[in-house]
Image (cartoon, grey):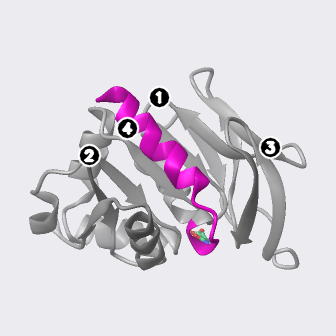
Amino acid sequence: MKIAVLALQGAFEEHRQMLEQLGVESVLIRNLNDWQQHFDGLILPGGESTAMMRVMKDEALFEPIRDAIKDGLPVFGTCAGMILLDDKHLGCMDITVKRNAYGRQLGSFCIEHEVNQIGIVPMVFIRAPYIERCGSGVEVLSTLDNHIVAARQDHMLACSFHPELTADTRIHKYWLSTIYEKR
Ligand code: GLN
């Protein structure tokens, strides 16, 4: 098992470390050349979605990433990574995401909260988005104050918060288990 982590900007290193802790090999994707190798899944990290969109397009990675996900490449998007997966960006998940949805006052916060199939996990929100609309093929995994903060659609998992910034590996393990199931 080898997992690619999009490393154009943002919290990619923390994802790489979490994979290392789980004994999973990872590769950082910075350009089209890195993209050519074989891997079993892709992580889109948190950071700044507008910057990531721009660099993805500059590096000619936008179409290859979109097409690979649409063809079934397992993907996990956290925070800005969730924004990238929505209908206004890569258009892979049938979700509409509201950016910076918690406003300035509540820009960043940390709580413990339930995720279906996983249990109560620590959630770190940093200028976080939430899902404001999802299609019928989307399974809602966690709702906080009536807003969707984690969801899965087939081979695609997205969450508003940053599991890679905590010591809790269960969400990564859950996503990896969905890849093993498919193999
Ligand atoms: N506010 C960022 C954006 O809109 C997301 C924040 C994050 O990834 N922590 O892209």
Tell me: 54 left or right of 157: left
Three-letter code, disc 1: Asp
Task: Name which of mark 3 and mark 2 comes first in the sequence.
Answer: 2
Mark 4 — residue? 179
- Ligand 1 is in which quadrant of the figure? bottom right
- Contact, mark 1 vs mark 3 (Cβ under 8 Å): no
Q: Is residue 102 visible?
A: yes
Three-letter code, disc 4: Ile
Task: Name which of mark 1 and mark 3 comes first in the sequence.
Answer: 3
Q: Position of residue 91 (x, y in %)?
A: 43, 42
The residue stretch that appears in magenta: 164-183
Element class at badge 3: strand
Task: Name which of mark 1 and mark 2 comes first in the sequence.
Answer: 2
Residue at image position (33%, 66%) is: 6
Mark 2 — residue? 40
What is the number of the mark on residue 154? 1
Mark 3 — residue? 143
- Contact, mark 4 vs mark 2 (Cβ under 8 Å): yes
Element class at badge 1: loop
Nearer-the-camera pick, 141 or 51: 141
